[in-house]
Amino acid sequence: MQQASYRILRQFPPPEIERAWRRFLEAIDLPSHYVTPEYFLEPSIQSARPFVLVAESAGAITGILTGRYLGRNLISGMPHRPQLVLAKGDGRLPAEKALIQGLLQEGRSCRLITVYAWEPLEGFSAAGFETTETAGTFLLYLSGSAENLFQGISARKRTYIHQVKRKGVDIKDSYDIQDIDELLDVFNETHRRHRLPLRTRTELEALLKLDCNRKLFIARAEGRVIAATIIRFVRGGLAEYSENVSLERMRHYHPNEALLWETIQWSYAQGCRAFSFGGANEFKSGFSSNIAPIYRLRRDQSVFHIIDRRDRLLRIARPVAKSVLVRCKKLFTKDG
């Protein structure tokens, strides 16, 4: 079995490594945007010291892990989005071991190292990472015909999508410079509603310029932009539902359902093999019933493993507290 080594990148790779990286991505299943070289171009991570671990064997890349820092924690991926890919076949385990070696070196002074993966990985468990299954994400495989994909959507969602057309809502996969101010208004109303940081015009324009792996779709009604959806994608790989924003007063048009269907159709036409919905909430459930599990691989490096100990206590305490609250509620209802 070939041994593998690792290297760490902290900026966009030179041409030779970039070419090898892209060859590797062409050979694996479902590569996603955050494991491509364009990861280094993401505006939102520039202050988080982004890095990429590259596993190599016999002159070829066999694994990629992208990550960033959050304070004294090192993190790769999110509960709905792994950022780790490994070669197929015999090169898989050596690549995994090389990436773990790089992670432990890179995160040697961190309190916590967290990696999200599409499956449990034995090498990580052997290196002291605790494996926990998350809620995962709805995943739609883009096979068959577009009509079959549409028929797979719930009847209610299909009705909303048809209504959008009848109500005169215009869905576009392009935007004009004049749309930016209205888009910014929609983004920031949504961010206020969800208590997220507001976007500046400069930040929004920088995001929209990343069009080799991102696509914006907008919905217009009553003479203005009322909603927008952004997806990330890799042709031949994975398309991902990245962000959706909408004006609450315009929700009766159901633009979000129509935008999501438009993104699925577009991804299918681009040759993407699957569409990840970026989570498993109720809104997305009408578009797919297939939940792909995602696993958190976490190594607690704090003194006395205090983070793991705290979390275990919380897991015990939550059901107890819930049971006490239910009993108290019954008692007070009875007394009342």
Image (spheres, rainbow, N blue to C red):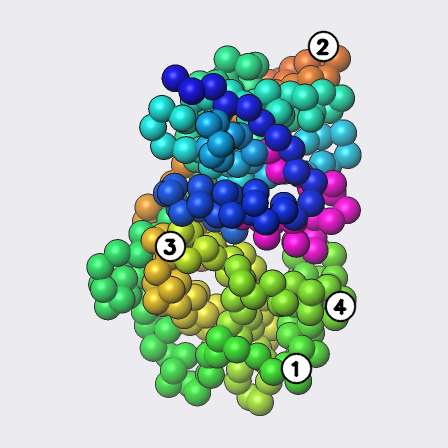
Circle 3 is placed at which residue position?
A: 236
Mark 2 element type: helix
Q: The residue under label 2 is which amino acid type?
A: Phe
Nearest to N terminus: mark 2 or mark 1:
1
Q: The residue under label 4 is which amino acid type?
A: Thr
Q: Do the residues labelled 4 and 2 touch (CB within 8 Å)?
A: no
Circle 1 is placed at which residue position?
A: 177
**Is 54 rendered above or below residue 25?**
above
The percent coordinates of residue 189 (x first, y second) are: 68, 68
- Residue at x-position 48% and y-position 27%: 57
Q: For the residues marked 2 and 1, what is the alpha-carbon distance in whole angstroms?
A: 55 Å
Q: For the residues marked 3 and 1, what is the alpha-carbon distance in whole angstroms?
A: 30 Å
Q: Are marks 3 and 2 in contact (CB under 8 Å)?
A: no
Q: Which dot marks residue 202? A: 4
Q: Do the residues labelled 1 and 4 touch (CB within 8 Å)?
A: no
Q: Quadrant of residue 16?
A: top right
Q: Is residue 214 visible?
A: yes
Mark 3 element type: loop
- Residue that extends furthest to the bottom in the rendered view of this protein: 223
Nearest to N terminus: mark 4 or mark 2:
4
Q: Give the range drawn in magenta.
A: 36-53
Q: The residue under label 3 is which amino acid type?
A: Gly
Nearest to N terminus: mark 3 or mark 1:
1
Nearest to N terminus: mark 3 or mark 4:
4
Neighbor class of circle 4 (other Cα within 10 Å; few <14, some 14-19, many 20+) is few
**Is 302 rendered above or below residue 35?**
above
